[in-house]
Image: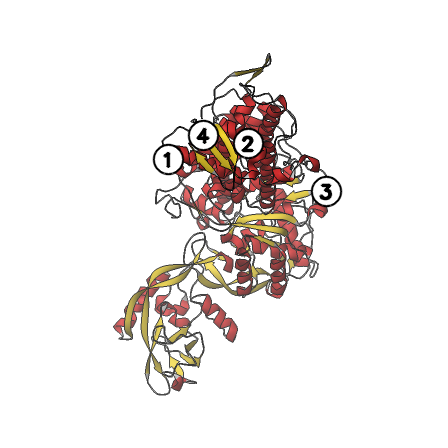
Amino acid sequence: MIYARIIYKYKDESFALMLKEKNWNKNFEKEIYERWTKTKKQLKGNKIFSIDTPPPYVNTPIHIGHATTYVLMDMFARYRKMKGYNVLFPLGLDRNGLPIEMEAERKFGVKLSDISREEFLELCKKVLDESSYASLNSFLRLGISFNSWQESEDIGDLYCTDSESYRKLTQSTFIDLWNRGLIYEAKRINNYCPGCRTTIADAEVEYEERKTCYNEIVFKIKETGEEIMVGTTRPELICTCAMVCYNPEDERYKHLKGKTAITPIYEKGVEIRAHPIAKMEKGTGLVMMCSMGDLTDVRFFRELNLEPEIAINIDGRMNERGGFLEGLKIDEARERIVEELNNRRLLKGRKEIMHPVPICERSKDPIEFIEMDELYLKQLDFKDDMREIAKEINFYDESSRNILLDWIDSIAMDWPITRRRYYGTEVPVWYCKACKKPILPEKGRYYRPWTEKPPFEECPCCHSREFEGETRVFDTWFDSSSSILYVLGYERREDFFEKSFPCTLRPQGKEIIRTWLYYTLLKTYLLTGKKAFEDVWINYHVLDDKGKKMSKSKGNVIKPEQILDLYGAEPFRLWCVLEGNLTKDDFRCSFERIEGVKKTLTKLWNVARFITNFEPCEEKPTCPIDRIMAKETDRLIDFCDSCYEKYDFHDPAVKIREFIWETFASHYLEMVKSKAYNDRNIFSEDERKSAISTLYRTLKVVLKLLRPINPFITEKIYSEIWSDGELDLFPETVKEKEEMVKEKEEMVEMADLMELNHLVWKEKKDRGLSLKDGVKKLILPEKFRPIEKDIVTTHGVEKLEYGNEIQVLL
């Protein structure tokens, strides 16, 4: 259908077409989002909806996953604003931790260990200065409606995790937890990343299938001289072997119970014991338990209370326990001992296998297990409490709850919260040089113990006046887990915190359930005794059009800036909800998929242009067909409202698209346009106004329902037609008086009418006729009688009769 730009004249009155532009143009967006930036609102009142948004790292611009998930969060925020909530929707930038340091090392070609701390921190700041605001322009162009509970001192609604105020809060939470006896220092075996050169928590360890060699090595039985074959992928750790195990059900080795195995080369006697850790079907069925080859070894040593012997230094090289391997890197040591075993004829078999290797989630380096002093936050004592909290929170989608529960069940040690890096929040502790007692300052400001004097004069225990400042920083998740407390004003705006806590919503990716979500729940519970969130929304990933992860090396990356330059924000925002439900499945993204949804925006624009041919009127729908349309529109309102409430914008978007194309444009509009024009004076003035008012009311409802999804085009259309400022109020259903609705009129539904139209149009098409051609005779069920005038004028019916079923005679 082509809509002309006209001046409509009716009874000597003229009315100019309100939507003057022929098409929606992405260039309209800039004027709108620049206007939004000048109209910030502070939160007032008690009805608060708060979102603890995931601060993206700023070492690189936002990627397509960020763009997609933040657009969806913006829809949550806009809908709640329309429902009358004061919405807290802050923007944070994560500027702490390993990603920043790794980018500095990469960009400037240095290693943290090669230069001074001051020099390295300056390099980190250079990285941050160049990249921090690269993402802000993309968020602005996407129409993200961030806001906060107060205007910040320097950067509006934005907060940064390396700001003095944020780091002060992190240190404050540490001091509180320390004073409650929940933090302690201990020397334990921990995951250690040689690449990052720091301890990492279990939650930061991933497993990746990598090629390695499985070796069958000769051990001898001390008591009998018998040779046994022990399988291992870590022969360089023979020097730390503490036990050889076989499965209790394995008949081949039951005679070895209680005997002693002599390790090859190192000639050390170790106990042989039955234990289910050995699998009968795997390798030789005999395994050596060394300290520490993987997490299984770590847990085994803890279970049996064995004293570990660590053979790997923090620089990733073998130490003196490795004997002739001392000083070699792990890979070098592995090849060297294999060579030696082979020379001594103690290597009986070697084959290449795929083996799950624990790696650092950031650097992807294989994890080693090193004994180091670290500070720990207690979590083992609170596993039952955390399970209960996990059950209290509403999860969207429900299946994501099990990921959290499974992680809680798997926790086997307290959380090591200190890291031996530089760019992070410093641990606020000084140590007395005389008695070594750790001393914490009072809360209230940001401390840097490695470079400043303590805020006290003497040690409270021995009265010494000499101190040494802590050099370690916090695990980045100890920082990030403060985000909810920070955005709700904890210890800064206690009045606001009390009425807004717990936070309403935590939206985040499923891959950080075990880190950001879990640690936030744990830390918040330890500080407040309550759950951190009412709702948790977990998203899957955005992949390329073939279902593959996007990466620069594969050349399949789609950048948000490219999409915005090509199409603007609106097609992308609509694609985000039409593509699927991101809480249940991964998305496939391509330029073609995004471009495809532009047709719906064009359709909406054209429908609006057609409607604005007629002067708006506010009469209630009096004609049966208009009341049928009003009823169908009310159903759409109720459906969208119930779905939006549960963070489901996919199903409503699909329904709205169908409503625009089919119910509204193809059927209702086609049936009432002749009534709205009324150029043949077939209809009364009341009937004409009933149709026009229904057209405008339906358009207004569609714009409001689309408002959270497509804020630009809806504002453009709405502001050209109405000046009532009600676009940001969620639409209400029509409240009709009972006497206006007759029982026989209720018998006809929009679905019945659409079915009738499809039958008539199909019959004409099958006969090779134009849709404008008339119908000689139409037989209809009695329920269509109230709208017979509309049917006759729409289809050009010459004779209308009533019967049991629809019959079309051409």
Give the residue type that dot 2 points to: Glu
The C terminus, quarter of image: top left
> Which is nearer the eye, 640 or 795?
795
Question: From mark 2 to mark 4, how far is it between C-alphas?
Answer: 14 Å
Find disc 2 in the rendering and name its residue: 788
Foreground tag (1 vs 2) = 2
Give the residue type that dot 3 points to: Asn
Q: Please give the label number shown on residue 291.
A: none
The residue sitting at 63% across, 43% down in the picture is 165
Q: Going from the N terminus, do you reach mark 3 or mark 2 first?
A: 3
The residue sitting at 48% across, 29% down in the picture is 797
The N terminus, quarter of image: top left
Question: From mark 4 to mark 1, how far is it between C-alphas?
Answer: 14 Å
Find disc 1 in the rendering and name its residue: 766
Foreground tag (3 vs 2) = 2
Question: From mark 3 to mark 1, how far is it between C-alphas?
Answer: 62 Å
Find disc 3 in the rendering and name its residue: 46
Is the residue under label 4 in contact with that under label 3 (CB below 8 Å)?
A: no
693 left or right, relative to 221: right
From the viewer's perspective, is residue 316 above or below residue 656? below
Question: From mark 1 to mark 2, how far is it between C-alphas?
Answer: 24 Å
Q: Tell me if mark 4 has few (under 14), some (14-19) or many (20+) residues whose alpha carbon lies within 10 angstroms of its own.
A: many
> Considering the numbered disc 3 on the image, is that residue within a helix, a strand or a loop?
loop
743 left or right, relative to 593: right
The residue sitting at 61% across, 45% down in the picture is 166
- On the image, the x and y values in percent for residue 111 come to 43, 48
Find disc 4 in the rendering and name its residue: 775
Residue 790 seen: yes
